[in-house]
Image: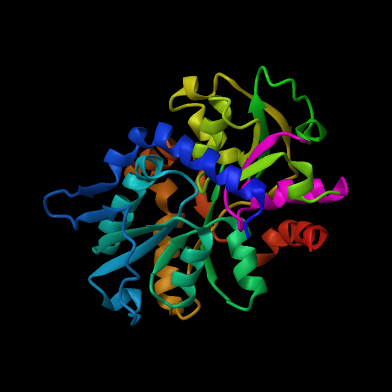
Amino acid sequence: MKNRKEIYGGFLFWSACIILSFSFLSACNFTSSKRGNPSVSINLNDTSDGDTSYSPMDTVLYLKVAVSAMISPKETFAYYKELFGYISRKTNKKIKIIQRKTYSEVNKLLNNNQVDIAFICSGAYVNDRRNGYPIKIVAIPVINGKPTYQAYIITYKSSGIKKFEDLKGKSFAFTDPLSNTGYLYAISRIKTLGYNKKKFFKDYVFTYAHDISIQLVAKQIIDGASVDGLIFDYLQHSPPKRLKNIRIVEKSQLFGIPPIVVPPTTPDSALKKLQRILCQMDKDTTGIKILKKLMIDRFVPANDSLYNSIRRMDKIIE
C-alpha cells in the first residue's frame, strides 16, 4: 500500500500539472530544417524504444539522441534546438530526439544500445557506472570557467524558511530519484541530520523536471525544492520574472557537470568524431553564437574522476 505522503504528493503533483501544462504542451513536436541541410526531427513525446538493433554512428542516416527530462518539453526544445541543428549539419545526418520522463528510462536506452548519444544527469551517469554499465563520456560543458555545478535548495520569499533545517515538516519537490541536484544532495542533507525523507518532510513529490519544481515553489504550491543550479541560472535570463518569488536557501558543494555520453559499444572513431565537433564549437562563428545562447563557454573532454564527489556523497545515502 502506498505511503500516505506519496499519495498526497501525487495529488499535489497532478494538480500542479493541470495548472502548468498549458504552458508547454503545445510545444512538444517540432521539425527544423534548412535547404541543403539535414532536418532535425524533434519529437519530445516519443515513447517508442526505437530500433532494437544498433548501428555505429558512421553508418546510419540519422542519429538517435536521448534527452533526460531535466527540464520540461518546452524548455528542452528552446535549450537544445540550435545545438542539435549544429550537430546535424556537422555530421550530415538527421537527428531524432527521444525524451523520456525518468532518468532511468534514458539509461535503459543507453544500456540497450537503442540511442547513439544521450544528454544525462551526473547522478544518472554515476548510477550507471556503479551498476556496471561503462557508458562513455564524449564531452562536458564548461560554464563560467568551471566544469562543475551545484544544487540549489530553494523556497518562496514569504515562506519564513531561512536554512535547510527549517524545511522539516514542510512540503518538498524532488526532480528524479537518479538526479544529483534534484534528489541525491537533498537526501544526503537529510541523512546527516538523522532523518529520512518520509520523516523529515510533511509531503514530497517527484516532478521529473527542474523547471517544474521551480514553478511549484514560485506558485507556493510546494514549500521547497532541490534543483539544478545551471537550470536555475539559465531561467534567470529567460525570463527573469519566473524567479522573482524565489529565494535560494543554500547551495551545495561543487559536483561534476552533467555529461554528454554514448553507449559502451560505440566505436572510438565515432566517439572521437562527435567529440571533435563539440569541442571545436568555440572556434567557429556559428558555434560561438550557439554556445553564447546556451550560456556555455565551450565543450571539453572529461575524465570519470570528475564525478568522485558524487560517489562520496552516495556513500552517505547508502
Which corner quadrant of the image does residue 109 belong to?
bottom left
In the image: residue 170, left or right of residue 110: right
Where is 167 relative to 91, above or below?
Answer: above
Percent coordinates x, y for residue 215 in the rendering: 51, 31
Which quadrant of the figure contains the C terminus? bottom right
Where is 152 relative to 199, above or below?
Answer: above
Where is 111 relative to 315, above or below?
Answer: below
Q: How is the image coloured?
A: rainbow
- Tell which of 261 and 178 is nearer to you: 178
Which corner quadrant of the image does residue 72 belong to?
top left
Q: How many marks?
A: 0
Residue at image x 45%, y 62%? 118
Q: Which residues are magenta?
A: 169-194
Is-magenta flag for residue 179? Answer: yes
In the image: residue 164, left or right of residue 105: right
Percent coordinates x, y for residue 88 in the rendering: 28, 58
Percent coordinates x, y for residue 84 in the rendering: 33, 52
- Tell which of 196 and 302 is nearer to you: 196
Q: Is residue 147 visible?
A: no
Residue at image x 47%, y 26%? 237
Percent coordinates x, y for residue 50 in the rendering: 31, 71
Residue at image x 40%, y 61%? 66
In the image: residue 116, left or right of residue 253: left
